Amino acid sequence: MTGSASRTPSAERDVTGKGSPDGSRDKPVLEATGLVKLFGRVVGLRGVDLRLFPGEILAVIGDNGAGKSTLIKCLSGALTPDEGRLEIDGRQVRLKSTQEAREAGIETVYQTLAVAPALDIASNLFLAREIRRKGFAGSVLRMLDTGAMKEQASRHIKDLGISTLQNINQSVETLSGGQRQVVAVARTGAFGSKIAILDEPTAALGVRETGQVLKLVRDLRDRGLGVILISHNMPNVFETADRIHVQRLGGRAAVISPKTHSMQDAVAIMTGAMTVPESEQSLR
């Protein structure tokens, strides 16, 4: 079975940049070159290259210990690579924290979900970005403008086409697992101006909730964001991704496309049973 058979119509749009007047989608929004990360004598990353373009979903797959988590942490500012170069929109950056990554336009949703269950949906969307009241109340008393946050949160939810979150005042602890994931991803869509990194967003979700989350992921791509999707779920990867970055033993084994390779091919590359010449890879 090939992955292209189950791809949705929205995934068949132009991602080459030819539909863009300035061809901006031909230029990587995020480019990593030669990333190396060592943990003592343990090699986490060994010269990894990665390119992410605007308006595409790049899946990152690999067996346990392949370096997926280390790679994502280096891209999101949680770790600083020992060697290598990282560029955002062609400008070299050195991210020393996740806050610096957010300021550079990178939003990350980790598998553990950084949500506050006791707070409502609007407050969760504005975690660490709370709007304070104007004047003395905000600058000195540090009082929050809850009305403005709820209004903007409602607009973000509507703009993203999310129908599963009806009440913006509902506490997150009353939501299902899929709805909580939607809240976390929606925060990425609301504030991730360039890049969204999603770590196993459908883990432990049912079929229906998985579909809702994947639809939102595709919506983020269609809004022009570059999306990195880390997943062990091969059907989800081949249904959703435009390109697939395969990690193996701390390095990049290949970059393939669901249009040119099957799930069996991806597994073979992950295990080392198959190699793909660089000329046949989907490097863009």
Image (cartoon, rainbow, N blue to C red):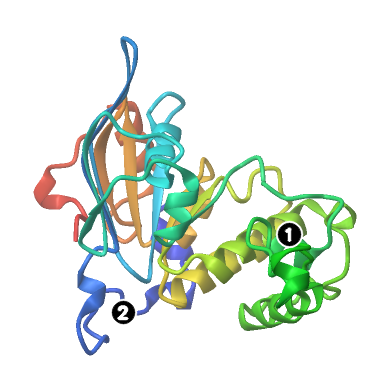
Q: CA distance from mark 2 to mark 1?
A: 34 Å
Q: Is residue 232 left or right of residue 277?
A: right
Tell me the residue that label 1 is attached to: 124
Type of the residue with mark 2: Asp
Residue 58 x/y as whole percent? 37, 56
Inspect the image, locate mark 1, and give the three-letter code of the amino acid beneath it. Answer: Asn
Quadrant hosting residue 242: bottom left
Which quadrant of the figure has residue 90?
A: bottom left
Q: Is residue 188 left or right of residue 143?
A: left
Vertical arrangement, residue 33 with respect to residue 157, above or below? above
Measuring from the top left, give residue 173's x and y in whole percent: 87, 52
Residue depicted at 36% across the width and 49% down the height: 262
Residue most extreme to the left:
279
Where's residue 247, x and y in %?
33, 35
- Residue assigned mark 2: 14
Residue at disc 1, secondary structure:
helix
Identified at 71% across, 77% down, the residue is 135
Image coordinates of residue 72 in percent, x first then y, are: 42, 41
Task: Characterize the local packing of mark 2: few (<14), some (14-19) or many (20 or more) Cα atoms within 10 angstroms.
Answer: few
Give the number of marks.
2
In the rendered view of the protein, which quadrant contains the C terminus?
A: bottom left
Q: Earlier in the sequence, mark 2 or mark 1?
A: 2
Question: Who's the residue at 49% across and 72% down the image?
Answer: 8
